[in-house]
Amino acid sequence: MTVEASSDGMILPALPPGDGRLADNIAFFGRALRKAGLKIGPGAIADAILAIEAIGIGSREEFRAALAAVFVKRHEDLPVFEEAFRLFWRSRNLVEKMIAMMSPVVRDASERERVKPGSARVSDALFAERERQAPVREEPDIEVDARFTASEREIFRRMDFAQMSAAEITAAKRELSKLTLPFDEVATRRFERSARHRLFDPRATMRASLRSGGGLMLPRYRQPKFIHPPLVILADISGSMSQYTRIFLHFMHVLTEKRRRVHTFLFGTQLTNVTRQLRHKDPDEAFEDCARKVRDWSGGTRIGETLHEFNRLWSRRVLGQGAVVLLITDGLERDGTEQLETEIDRLHRSCRRLIWLNPLLRFEGFEPRARGVRAMLPHVDEFRSVHNLASLGDLAQALSGARSRDADPRRFR
């Protein structure tokens, strides 16, 4: 095998003669993916070039599959890779462009393609170097009165996670680590010592008097013991939720780090308990353990079947002492809704509060037209959005006991 040096000095395997600058393009594509958030090193770029050399330049789908097999290490990185591959290796579409130029029909702006998840991160990675090398244009100084405009921090708090760049995702993770999580407390049937003269404790009084031989008997008092209720998270990782999986995993890791009794379950077509995996201090190590254990990333959704498995195997273990359940899903059930309605009702009766977090609420004028959404709405206590930092901050306040009319599910029935 021969080697050659790329334009930036990286040692790369040499492709057969006649392939032009394909090796340099693959190296540049790998560096762009690294800037977009994928964990790619020089060894992966060399392996990608060897893979293309082994399969040859055939169809576009074979070329994409070979690069994905080398570069994609985590399931949540697949949407970013797909968008980067589409932008970097797209064809020029010369025939379509010539037809569009010769056609007298002007295309309506409303037919433009919607922004795909991860496109902001990919665009920053691909075109950041070009923007830095562009000459600086002198702009006239314009004074703007910004007293009544939204600040950058407020805009960032309300930005959708799916449209954030790689730098914005990193900043969002830092904001999540600083998130204050005040949780409500529930009274248990146990007691603890108290300095206030409310409830007389005869047993503690007798034990204290025995220490002095019974000659001195001072009254002791007690009060009910309050604890933080368990927090149970059921998160959907199906294909329709893949654009939010990474930031939701980080949010679950923050909850697990700041609280003791947090139980986390991931589900798509099957239920997986990842509570132990998320207890690692290092977030990357925790996410790698989750990726190794979960087998149904970005697949279909069987909410009713997975809730049935949770109610049968885990509800009695984790739903004691007034547990609060966070159900993170869009409610797009693939199967029928009979089992879903039965199991969501059983889950609602087994916990103290059932909070449904649905990213579809980011759309204005949301209506519960899906069968799964209509079946679940009557059995939840709160219905909230979970697509930006502002919604997660509102969720933290809700967990402290504050109720809001905006989260009342009866508004959508």
Image (tube, rainbow, N blue to C red):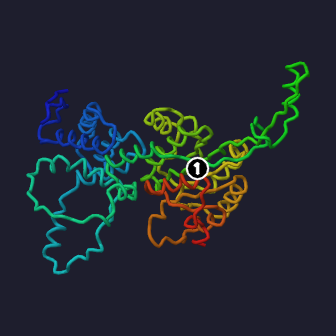
Q: Is residue 194 above or below residue 374?
A: above
Residue 197, above or below 92: above
Q: Position of residue 395 (x, y in %)?
A: 53, 55
Foreground residue, 231 or 177?
177
Looking at this view, is 345 or 9 the one in front?
345
Quarter of the image for residue 224 reads: top right
Image quadrant holding the C terminus, namely bottom right
**Residue pictured at 23% horizontal, 51% vertical:** 89
Looking at the picture, does residue 111 appear above or below residue 138? Answer: below
Badge 1: few (under 14), some or many (20 or more) residues near its Cα, within 10 Å? many
- Residue 132 falls left or right of residue 177: left
Residue that badge 1 annotates = 234
Residue found at x 91% / y 22%: 215
Please tell me how many numbered marks the rendered image carries.
Answer: 1
112 lies above or below 219: below
Compared across the picture, whether 238 is left or right of 2 comes to right
Q: Looking at the image, which is closer to me, 185 or 356?
A: 185
Residue 308: image location, x then y, percent: 67, 52
Q: Is residue 247 left or right of residue 197?
A: left
Is 138 positioned to the left or the right of 172 in the image?
Answer: left
Q: How far across and how far down the image is residue 14, in percent?
A: 17, 32
- Which quarter of the rendering shows the N terminus? top left
Considering every residue shown, the one lying at the far bottom of the view is 104
What amino acid type is highlighted by mark number 1? Leu
Element under label 1?
strand
Q: In this view, which residue lies farthest toward the front?
A: 216
Please identify the residue farthest to the right as the structure is shown. 214
Residue at 16%, 28% (x, y): give it.
3
Which is nearer the eye, 38 or 104?
38
How far from the left and from the top, in percent, is residue 202? 88, 34
